[in-house]
Image: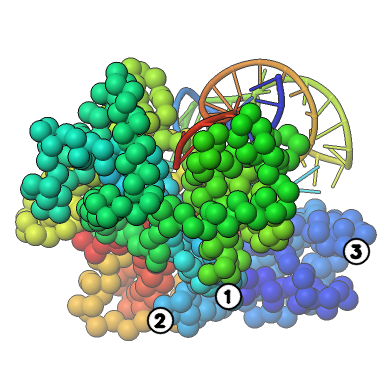
Amino acid sequence: MRHFSRQLASKIASFLDLDPEGLELDLVDPPDAKLGDLAMGCFPLAKLLRSSPVKVSQDLASRDWDIDWLEEVVATGPYLNLKVNREVFSQHAIGLIESSGESWGCTDSGNGKTVIVEYSSPNIAKHLAVHHLRSTMLGQAMANIFRSAGYEVVSWNHLGDWGTGFGKLLAAWESYKDFDDLDSPPLSEREDAVTDLNALYVRYSNDAKENPELEDLAREWFKKLENGDPLARDRWTMIRDVSLQLFDKIYSRLGVHFDTVIGESHYEEAMKGVIAKLSELNLLEESEGAEVVQVEEDIPPMLIRKKDGATLYGTRDLASAITRYENVKFDRCLYVVDAGQGLHFRQVFGVLKKMGYEWADHLEHAEFGVMRLNVDGHWKKGKTRGGQVVLLQDVLDKAVELAGAVVRKKNPDISESDLSEIAEAVGMGAVIFSDMKASRRKDVNFDLDKMLAFDGETGPYLQYTHVRFASILSKAAESKLARGDGSGLVEDEELVLIKRLLRYPEVTDKAAKSAEPSQLSQYLLELASDFNTYYAKHRVMSDDPQLSEHRLTLIESLKNTLATGLKRLCIQPLTRM
RNA sequence: GUCCCCGUAGCUCAGCUGGAUAGAGCAUCGGAUUCCUAAUCCGAAGGUCACAGGUUCGAAUCCUGUCGGGGACGCCA
């Protein structure tokens, strides 16, 4: 739509003797289609001219616009309502989209900028649980959207692979061989190594509640790990490897990919430098035996070092941010982490700022609401403790199973291999979309029935709409029709669709700027809904071949738009379902 | 107690850089399939935009306060 609003802006600038640069005006839909095809409030212009919006709109309506796609300009109070010449407008719009080709919907707002997106970041030696879905999918979608907006993107998995918990696991490995000897069969050859690790860990933790000396033993093992003891290091590496293998299986199902996988363990050295620098800057304060840094007036100080001298994850985050900036001079760095860690990030960002790092202003906590589980009829934050975890792979399998049943029912003569492929895509589509439909700050209740809904505003609805496009185009292929230039698209519903299409690049920018994939989700729903209304009323393959050719061009633009949008959200566009 | 997020239809949510009559989906009720996939579409019903002030020509949107929900607040991550 910018293409058109810029033309208007330059005309307005010449009419009113204004600088066309920075004259951003917003074209909206009038509240009633009878008023016009496009509308523009004259409030900002009036402010600029110190005049009244009603006068400005009257003045503008009386001008000679001389724009080929513009048919009528009417002032209605402070609004300027525009009627377009549909043939010309449609032709311009379709031409614009077609000439963009593959890059339709991509923008240059992020050109020359680099963004790091940190997301997923699970703990090793544990399964991915359903609550990991949020960070993982939101982060991946953000990374995809940033790429479409022209950014250089580094997608980053900050693994939880360090901490005293690994001391327990290593201690258990050594002393619980009777229960389960992790050396035979070796971890790498086990069917479900992570489950075995978990069982061992839970057992050890429970025993430690009664025998405090087990805690000491765990500390000893963690010390060994820190000091590079070969056995500890070896086993830790094995644990890391089997965990990553398991994660990758799920990541690839979800269309998730990382450019960098670096765990917390990586920052042990850098942390020493951070503490040295804090001390050099006189920022460290002693408080109740621990060392802290004051941040701002109204938030508590950040804890840097414990009484026993050990560091905390916040210290690691400081080190990590600094090393990141040294390696990647980012313009933005996003942490896709749940909102519960808001204070933590305020502290981290605040301390970095106090350390003199100006780039601390470019760190963003892209917070999201927690996923709540239903426990005895109440929605509660899902914690991995207590054993009440819902495994992500179970949810995905369940979704695919259910999708398979629906596909089979709707499509009885489909082959088994096609079916399983489609079921996988539809099941994933349902789960993924349900997570990204609403704005990320909203808490989500984990409701399997809603997650797996296939009707209404869902992933499968979008996929189904894409199937309709594909279906029309394959039917067209049989009749050797060419493609029109779009000038035959004059129906009300066609104008609606064209206006919707023209907003795609703006949606990309808005989604990137606000790090909000739901902007794209909502847009795709509107696009699909507009099309399905059109589809019920008009035939693309009509009796008039010329008209059909124009409409086929529209369908191609719609298909292209929906397909690229879905891919950004990690949902597969389908041609059959 | 302090700080952060949230409060829009029965439910789940759009709309929030102020602008024309607040929109969807689900659920409910009624309707549409000789023709491009009915996982769809059309219609009905459903609203004190939590409440009270303030700013403004104009507030769901901005500010202050109140109430309600969620979360975080030193030796876990």
Measure the alpha-carbon separation of dots 3 and 1.
Answer: 34 Å
Up-down relation of residue A339 to residue A185 (above or below): above
| A36 displayed left or right of A459 | right
Crowding at mark 1 (Cα within 10 Å: few <14, some 14-19, many 20+) = few
Q: CA distance from mark 2 to mark 1?
A: 33 Å
Q: Are marks 2 and 3 in contact (CB under 8 Å)?
A: no
First along the sequence among labels 2 and 3: 3
Q: Is residue A34 above or below residue B50?
A: below
Residue A402: image location, x then y, percent = 18, 42
Q: Amino acid at mark 1?
A: Asn
Kindly indicate whether the residue at mark 1 contacts the one at mark 3 (C-beta within 8 angstroms): no
How is colour applied across the structure in the image?
rainbow
Q: Is A510 located above or below residue B24 in the figure?
A: below
Q: Could you tell me the amino acid type at mark 2?
A: Gly
Question: Label 1: which residue?
Answer: A111
Q: Residue at x 61, y 66 (%)?
A: A331
Which amino acid is tagged 3?
Answer: Leu
- Look at mark 2 in the image and give the residue it sits on: A484
The location of residue A255, given as percent across then percent down, is 31, 60
Marks 2 and 1 belong to one chain:
yes
SS at badge 1:
loop
Residue A357 seen in render:
yes
Sequence-earlier tag: 2 or 1: 1
Which residue is at the front of the view, A254 or B30? A254
B38 with respect to A13 (left or right):
left
Give the quadrant of residue A8: bottom right
Quadrant placement of the C terminus of chain A: bottom left
Residue A49's label in the rendered image is 3
Locate the N terminus of chain A and report the quarter of the image it occupies: bottom right
For image coordinates 26% across by 42% down, the residue present is A170
Element assignment for label 3: helix
